[in-house]
Image: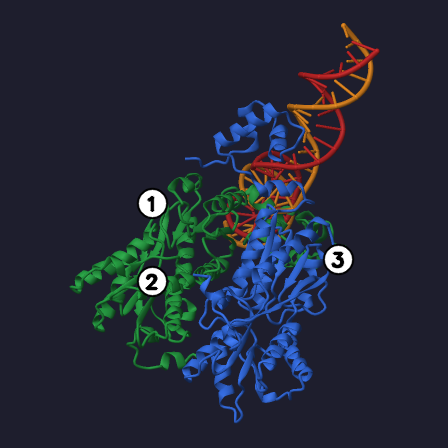
Chain colours: A green, B blue, C orange, D red
Amino acid sequence: MGKERVTVIDIARAAGVSKSTVSLVLQASPLVNETTRAKVNAVIRELGYVYNRGAANLRQSNAKSKIIGIVVNDLTNSFFAELAVGVDMVVQSAGYVQFLANTGESVDRQREVIASMREHGISGLILSPARGTEASDLKSLVASGIPVVNVVRQVAGAKVSSLVSDNHAGTREAVRHLAGLGHHRIAFLGGFPDTAVFHERLQGYRDALSDMDLAVHDELVISSAPSRAGGVAAIERALLLRERPTAAVCFNDAVAFGVCDGLRAHRLDPGEDFAVIGFDDVIEAQTAVPALTTISVDPQGMGRRAAQLLLKQINAGRADAEAIVSSVRLVVRQSCGAATDKRERLSLL
Amino acid sequence: MGKERVTVIDIARAAGVSKSTVSLVLQASPLVNETTRAKVNAVIRELGYVYNRGAANLRQSNAKSKIIGIVVNDLTNSFFAELAVGVDMVVQSAGYVQFLANTGESVDRQREVIASMREHGISGLILSPARGTEASDLKSLVASGIPVVNVVRQVAGAKVSSLVSDNHAGTREAVRHLAGLGHHRIAFLGGFPDTAVFHERLQGYRDALSDMDLAVHDELVISSAPSRAGGVAAIERALLLRERPTAAVCFNDAVAFGVCDGLRAHRLDPGEDFAVIGFDDVIEAQTAVPALTTISVDPQGMGRRAAQLLLKQINAGRADAEAIVSSVRLVVRQSCGAATDKRERLSLL
DNA sequence: TTAGATAATTGGAACGTTCCAAAATTGTCA
DNA sequence: TGACAATTTTGGAACGTTCCAATTATCTAA
């Protein structure tokens, strides 16, 4: 039953008009008479017609496919899941649909999925590049005139727009806050040192220490995987130091949660005995115990802004690359030991 | 530069063959001579040709589009993010690409995204239905012969395959384990009571209590949003009871984490003073402190199996609906107070 | 050498839509 | 009523691919 497709021609026949008229109705063209439109629409519903976008954008090679691609490097990290949700929101409401793929930090996989998306005729791409992505990986894509917006990470030398958070200002503010609370041995924990993001955040940390006339101790910078497990590992090493730190700025929230876990495993109370600050403000940050003080980058908002930027470029035909640095703000909660009230947490219940 | 598309005809001209031959090369047909194939492939690379799938599956209306759709009801829940990653794995390696959309539990949004996916000619759909989805919402989809696999939640009366976890056996085993540890006031916390999943898990809880000759106290069943915040709320209410429970089986891991948070807020130590068991085994379950005892449903594995089931149906032309109940197992960690070693956690570092 | 088989190649037609130029219909006003 | 404009409608061509039937090139063996 219902095996063979209902086409625009079937509709035309049933409604007693030409296929061109049906096409105009489908595009909500003002050229068609109201009565005709109503009749055609009725037939469309009756026959259960479904529009064939493949055929459509075969003809209109300029006005593209209404698909935008989004590829992220780690979907299991809730930061990226939320980013994707933010993108989805604006993209949907603009009548586009999103193709989502996960690369798991593999540039090979990334190449495959981008190729596949091109074959499907995406009109734009939002990309959180896998580690090790080079400008050449994106070259043919941008050469073909498909707008690309990089998020979270930049790719050096690539002529594409980017939207990254102000990593330098973020860690800088975090360190200043901790120093203001009287800490002077502040660690920087987690993250892979071969990424630009890591260096930006680390530099913010270093600059803030200088600003506050505090010494920079290299042994207090401990890199690790940017994950919860990595956070546990990093704090373990930090606690082995002859002179222990009393506070830490973490590469991201996942690391910060791991650090809290590790502290507890040593019978230390995060927020009381040791101050912890994260980066990202993922959704769990406010409900965790202790609630996490963190640099808020608002992943969903970032996804929304990236999508808007991309749509702007798609509509503009070919806007030239712009680099947007999205500002961040410190959200003070319990984990840095400075919060004075519990209202924020309780209001969630 | 590079504005106009390179087509199969351009390739043909440049390689000195006909477009039909190029087409055969693209399909890796054995009919074409090795030398010709090599030459054509060289030209393809040289001119930077990209395959136009839209045009292709316009012609071959039977062999579909190599797109599979996946729509989930809450992508910010890491369970679904991991499910999507699992689906992506097998779908990618079968040469398909995945269209992912998030409904945020809205049936309206769900209707929109499914319609959009149909227009793009998906060859199959994996669906974790939004709350309130009815069989009629899927009717025209299955009538058109597109295979659908429901995951996590079933839709009553819908003639589609489904893959759900054995909810009843899961909570049953959890309760038995707690009873075996000597608990006899065991709560069931979290979840929306208007879902089938809730009832299945609740029934497993009840049946296990009966099995163990324990009384079923209705006040120990406290529903809430299936989220971390919901877990906090549920345990708050449980601790207000005249006769407090000493253990809880939670609707899912998110609730369980919230319960741990809530316990700590009352200076109770989860695992020591109160036993907590979750459901799902999300990735954080093993790294959390205390590591969460939970019913493992292996979200990635479930995604993989759902994708395999779907691909099987796509290839079979039209396999009839099958309902698979995926078995679950109790993973004992610290949060139920029964774990004897820390090796599992430490091995992660 | 050639008949017959096999291997390799090829030109159109077709898929379902949109666009274009042109035709048909309706409306307006002197 | 006729002439012109404005509104609606329409038939084909085109988009980039695959399929089919048919053609051409190459091989085999008597």
Q: Is residue B86 above or below residue B106?
A: above
Using residue B280 as the reference point, say whether residue B324 is left or right of it.
Answer: right
Cα–Cα span, label 3 and label 1: 51 Å
Mark 1, residue position: A156
Q: Are marks 2 and 3 on the same chain?
A: no
Subunit of label 3: B
Mark 2, residue position: A237
Looking at this rendering, what residue extends furthest in the front direction?
Answer: B340
Looking at the rendered image, the quarter that the N terminus of chain A falls into is: bottom right
Viewer-nearest residue: B287 or B96: B287
Mark 3, residue position: B320
The amino acid on which the numbered mark 2 sits, given as a three-letter code, is Arg
Helix, strand or loop for disc 1: loop
Q: Are marks 2 and 3 in contact (CB under 8 Å)?
A: no
Subunit of label 2: A
Helix, strand or loop for disc 3: loop
Residue B154 position in % (x across, y down): 66, 68
Cα–Cα span, label 2 and label 3: 56 Å
Q: How many marks?
A: 3
Q: Is residue B94 above or below residue B7?
A: below
Nearest to viewer (mark 2 / mark 3): 2
Nearest to viewer (mark 1 / mark 2): 2
Residue at 40% x, 50% y is A149
Instruction: For label 1, count other residues whose C-alpha is less than 10 Å away and answer few (under 14), some (14-19) or many (20+).
Output: few
Q: Are marks 1 and 2 on the same chain?
A: yes
Residue A24 seen in the current view: no
Helix, strand or loop for disc 2: helix
The amino acid on which the numbered mark 3 sits, given as a three-letter code, is Asp
